[in-house]
Image (cartoon, rainbow, N blue to C red):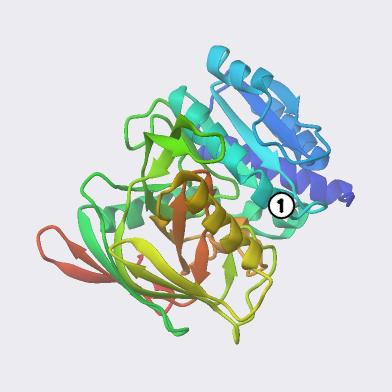
């Protein structure tokens, strides 16, 4: 496992403390929980950062040597019954890259069944790496990002439709239901925009996105039982999305000559194709989820990257924050896969009929 230099470790601690102060906006004596999943160095840095902010810190380790289907009840009970004011979950899958996809359901359960239901500011870091913390988006200017996120959120206020094109061939129109709003991970202060007690966002920060979930009763065809699960509110999308950068759950860059092409009709994924077999497990999971719960995979999210320090790496946690990029995410029960395109042009139509180009060939329309 990589060991950072003393100087690099101090850089990480300094930026994590900046994140806690400026993005989570926590204050001295607030309680703070750090969940460590195979990320001991970053967890140690997070403890030091939180202590430097004079927070009351606790660390919880997830040590299982295989992927979790559900995280331990001890952790869920801790969050529900002794809710910290803030916290972060550091999930490093560098040594077990397939675990990211295999633990996806457990992470969704953690966020929507627990984190959103308690008054907490939560930083969610699936696939965080030391390189990301030392050389990449964790080293951003948090004050600047908070300001720019608010400016972009203002541009997206009362938007009813987005038309997104990209040089790779993407051409899609998305109509946002009135109930779905844009939010940001650059400011993680609860409650969330849907008045849930808790709010979560990614660390590294650096995007604005629109997404909303709901809890429904669904038939589990594997167990034969009816259960309550989280399922997204559908964004009404029509067109073609050509993902030529990266996709969540696959830890490599997409070969530009072998992109993933997804067709959407009325917000439902109707077809997908890729000549590269590498990303196949992501779509195998999508099809398995559809079969298990009998529900279509639908468009769950659309997002725009803002972080000036993010790089194209093949790791979606970083790539979707890359300034001027755009991603959509098909979703289902315990399934979510971000799909990124580079250099998009995004035209927004507001409720009053006004249109404006908010991203032009990957350039953000910000002051």
For the point 56% across and 32% down, the residue is: 110
Residue 156, image quadrant: bottom left
Residue 48 appears left or right of 325: right
Residue 1 at what x, y percent from top left? 90, 50
Residue 116 at what x, y percent from top left? 45, 30
Q: In the picture, which quadrant includes the C terminus?
A: bottom left
For the point 13% across and 66% down, the residue is: 354
Residue 175 at what x, y percent from top left? 24, 61
> Looking at this view, is 128 or 332 the one in front?
332
> Looking at this view, is 14 or 210 the one in front?
210
For the point 37% across and 34% down, the residue is: 216
Q: Name the outermost residue toward the top.
A: 81
Q: Name the outermost residue toward the front.
A: 224
Q: Is residue 355 above or below residue 198?
A: below
Q: How many marks?
A: 1
Residue 325 appears left or right of 247: left
Query: Can I make out residue 314 in this image?
Result: yes
Query: Can I make out residue 144 in this image?
Result: no
SS type, badge 1: helix
Q: Is residue 148 above or below residue 225?
A: below
Question: Could you classify mark 1 by the number of other residues whose Cα lies within 10 Å: few (under 14), some (14-19), or many (20 or more)?
Answer: many
Residue 176 appears left or right of 200: left
Residue 275, image quadrant: bottom right
Q: Which residue is mark 1?
A: 133
Q: Is residue 226 above or below residue 100?
A: above
Residue 192 at what x, y percent from top left? 38, 34
For the point 57% across and 73% down, the residue is: 245
């Amino acid at each position: 496992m990589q060991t950072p230099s003393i100087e690099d470790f101090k850089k990480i601690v300094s930026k994590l403390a900046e994140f806690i102060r400026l993005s989570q906006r926590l204050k001295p004596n607030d309680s703070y929980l750090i969940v460590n999943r195979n990320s001991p160095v970053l967890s140690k840095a997070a403890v030091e950062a939180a202590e430097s902010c004079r927070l009351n810190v606790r660390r919880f380790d997830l040590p299982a040597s295989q992927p979790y289907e559900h995280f331990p009840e001890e952790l869920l009970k801790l969050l529900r019954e002794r809710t910290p004011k803030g916290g972060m979950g550091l999930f490093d899958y560098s040594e077990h890259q397939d675990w990211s996809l295999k633990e996806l359901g457990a992470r969704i359960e953690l966020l929507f069944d627990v984190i959103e239901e308690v008054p907490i500011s939560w930083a969610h870091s699936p696939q965080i790496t030391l390189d990301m913390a030392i050389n990449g988006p964790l080293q951003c200017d948090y004050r600047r990002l908070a300001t720019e996120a608010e400016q972009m959120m203002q541009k997206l206020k009362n938007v009813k439709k987005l038309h997104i094109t990209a040089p790779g061939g993407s051409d899609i129109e998305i109509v946002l239901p009135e109930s779905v709003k844009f939010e940001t991970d650059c400011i993680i202060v609860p409650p969330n925009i849907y008045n849930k007690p808790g709010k979560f966002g990614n660390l590294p920060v650096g995007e604005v996105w629109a997404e909303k979930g709901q809890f429904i009763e669904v038939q589990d065809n594997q167990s034969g039982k009816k259960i309550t699960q989280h399922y997204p509110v559908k964004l009404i999308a029509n067109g073609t999305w050509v993902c030529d950068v990266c996709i969540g759950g696959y830890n490599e860059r997409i070969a530009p000559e072998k992109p993933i092409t997804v067709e959407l009709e009325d917000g439902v994924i109707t077809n997908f194709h890729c000549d590269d077999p590498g990303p196949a497990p992501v779509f195998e999971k999508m099809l398995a989820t559809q079969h298990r719960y009998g529900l279509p995979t639908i468009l769950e999210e659309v997002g725009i990257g803002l972080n000036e320090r993010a790089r194209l790496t093949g790791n979606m946690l970083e790539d979707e924050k890359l300034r001027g990029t755009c991603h959509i995410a098909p979703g289902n029960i315990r399934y979510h896969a971000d799909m990124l395109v580079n250099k998009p042009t995004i035209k927004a139509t507001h409720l009053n009929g006004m249109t404006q180009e908010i991203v032009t060939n990957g350039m953000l329309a910000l002051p």
